[in-house]
Amino acid sequence: MSSPKKPRIAILGTRGYPAVYSGYETWLKELCDHLNDKYEFHVYCHRSFFPEKPKVVNGVHLHYIPTVKTKNLSQITHSALSTIHSLFCNYDLYFFVNVSNGPFGVILKWFGKRTAINTDGIEWERPKWKGFGGKYFKWGASISSRNFDVLVSDSLNIQKYYKEHFKTESVMIAYGAYPKESTNPELINRFNIKANEYYLVVGRMVPDNHIEEIVKGFILSRSNKKLVIVGDVTYKDSFADRVKAMANENVIFTGYVKDQLVLKELFSNSYCYLHGHAYGGTNPSLLKALAYGCCILAHENVYNRETLLDDKHGYYFKSQPESISEVIKFIDTKTDEVLFKKKISRERISGIYTWETVCNQYDELFIKMINNKKWKLNATTTDKK
């Protein structure tokens, strides 16, 4: 007797599986790995990212779709072609990430498909999306709120934003992390740094993450420690070039660090982690910093305060270099406070921020959407505290 046929779910809008380039790809890998015994996942991948193109990996079905390779058109053209392909496959659920894909919810709605979308952050407020880009993202959020069956917010404050600005309820499901400790501290030696003698930044080299202000603030502080910046951009960019030009003997740009063991050691052995992200909800890098036992200095905004439980797990700075300089000067001399923050940081990765909890919540959502075609979202909140 054959086993029951598993529901088929299409995942669209990411770079693909099993590559891990960002928070979305990490989420995708965890989702598929936790739930592929219950669902038949079909992931739409950027063809150019995968030299080898197996059709199935770890039970996940992969579709390699081409795109226009430019900064502004790469994702939108890939999603458009992926949507067209997916329409002929008749999946039980179509799950998109990022509201830039909002228009494709309209197309799927015309064909009576069951759809959901992870909204991500407030993209239209990001400095890199000035002008038309910002207007497009805001329009995408508006059209997503009207045409997708279910919206997923990754934090309570994103959920609140969509309710207030778009009059739309959303399911709150955060991201996750795995608490880990340093096991091979010698892996950081390649960067000519020592444990507890450097501040760490992990993120893309874009204005949104306040990397330029962090570098200026660090230099202004005259700290004797080093500043290590992990991340880059995949395209030629004048902003990234300008920030990299600020490097001196105390400011180190590592570029991308794809080896997760090395990245874990960079987090775990830092004196403090500097988090400049300001326009998203639950940030995966911030969760990693907590999970790997960091003392955290974060940009002052409601999203970071929500994740860090206000002052319990974090110190905060404003956008200006002077503010960053002051918090570095303060924390440079507070070794005991830094050690205490490190000691309690992993406590925050429990319940709502474990991957098991996150994937169980997605499982519950998928079951509701697939088994009941008329199910609509009521007000749904999750108390993270």
Image (cartoon, rainbow, N blue to C red):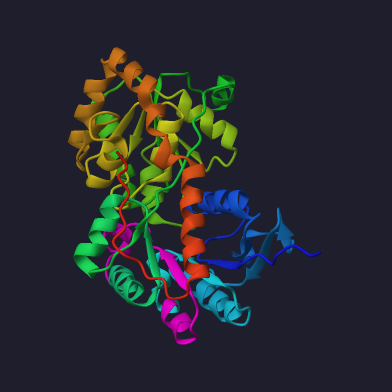
- How far from the left and from the top, in percent, is residue 223? 30, 22
- How far from the left and from the top, in percent, is residue 346? 41, 28
Can residue 119 be seen at all in this image of the molecule?
Answer: no
Can residue 13 be seen at all in this image of the molecule?
Answer: yes
Assess whether residue 118 is covered by the magenta stretch: yes
Asked if residue 131 lies left or right of residue 364, the reply is: left
Compared with 280, 223 (above or below) is above
Compared with 40, 200 (above or below) is above
Please state the extent of the stretch shown in magenta in the rendering. 105-131
For the point 50% across and 79% down, the residue is 113
Which part of the image, by quadrant, shows the N terminus?
A: bottom right
Looking at the rendering, which quadrant does residue 210 occupy? top left
Most extreme residue toward the right is 1
- How far from the left and from the top, in percent, is residue 185? 55, 20
For the point 27% across and 46% down, the residue is 303
Q: Which of 56 and 331 is in front in this view?
A: 56
- How far from the left and from the top, in percent, is residue 312? 26, 28
Compared with 269, 124 (above or below) is below
Asked if residue 292 lies left or right of residue 332, the reply is: right
Which part of the image, by quadrant, shows the C terminus?
A: top left
Assess whether residue 244 is covered by the magenta stretch: no
